Amino acid sequence: MQAIILAGGLGTRMLPRTEHVPKSLLLVAGRPFIEWQLRRLAECGFDRVLLCIGHLGDAIRSAVGSGTRFGLRVDYSDDGPRLLGTAGAIRRALPHLDEVFLVTYGDSYLPFDYSGPWRDLEQHSEALGTMAVFANQGRWEASNTAVRGDRVLRYGKGSADPTLDHVDYGATALRRQVIAELPLDEPWGLDAVQGELAERALLRAWHARERFFEIGSPEGLADLEFLLRGKS
């Protein structure tokens, strides 16, 4: 199984810590954050990871290397001088993509089985994606997803719609053809891709049961530090 980690962000909310250190290498419970991610993906059965890197990407390459010490094969795709958004970065990496892959974010730590959305999509040939969702009800951040059973009915990132009671958990399985259909070297957000798949009734829902964690803010990093200190 292949996972894509989008690790090219600038980390502006974490300045000044991310001025010279990429967000993926911020220390959490005594380890660079990306080590926690990679070990968790390996535990869930993934054997290959593609890191989409940009800001201070060489530091990530040096720290992770080939990935063998995590039980993985790690490859890299550089964002390049022009930022193309989250889906645009995946489009640039098209030659490296499996027919089905999982995409997650370089600042997310998800206490669930990462293989769940991937396996679900493998079992449902009628769908083009399976998105992990959480019944957030506005508790951790603004809810952005409407779900019925195993279907994502609507996805509206940044929406203030009170009828949206779930949130995109931060891990989505996709078929390669979804990314192949995007124009090369044009900006695209992954949220736009997810929203379009939901509108076409081609996006399934995988229900996560525990809250998500992230290191995109000082508060988020402190919450994750508390969680992972107990695992160290």
Image (tube, rainbow, N blue to C red):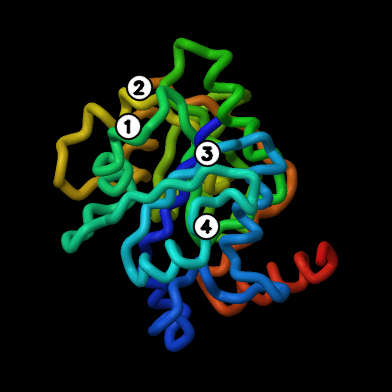
The residue located at (37%, 32%) in the rendering is: 97
Report if residue 53 is visible in the image: yes
Q: Is residue 64 left or right of residue 86?
A: right
The residue located at (55%, 51%) in the rendering is: 67
Residue type at tag 3? Arg
Separation of marks 4 and 1 at Cα, in angstroms: 20 Å
The mark closer to the camera, 4 or 3, is 3
Residue 142's disc number: 4
Separation of marks 2 and 1 at Cα, in angstroms: 6 Å
Dot 3: element? strand
Dot 4: few (<14), some (14–19), or many (≥20) neighbours within 10 Å? Answer: some
| Circle nearer the N terminus (2, 3) | 3
Q: Position of residue 18 (x, y in %)?
A: 44, 80
Pick whichever, 208 or 165, lies toward us.
208
Pick whichever, 12 or 20, lies toward us.
20
Residue type at tag 4? Ala
Q: Position of residue 122 (x, y in %)?
A: 54, 18
Residue type at tag 2? Arg
Note whether 208 is above or below 157 in the view shown. Answer: above
Dot 2: few (<14), some (14–19), or many (≥20) neighbours within 10 Å? Answer: few
| Circle nearer the N terminus (3, 1) | 3
Separation of marks 4 and 3 at Cα, in angstroms: 32 Å
Image quadrant of residue 44? top right
The residue located at (59%, 22%) in the rendering is: 120
Image quadrant of residue 1? top right
Separation of marks 2 and 3 at Cα, in angstroms: 30 Å
Q: Position of residue 154 (x, y in %)?
A: 44, 34
Instruction: Report the residue marked by disc 3.
Output: 48
Residue type at tag 1? Glu
Residue 200's disc number: 2
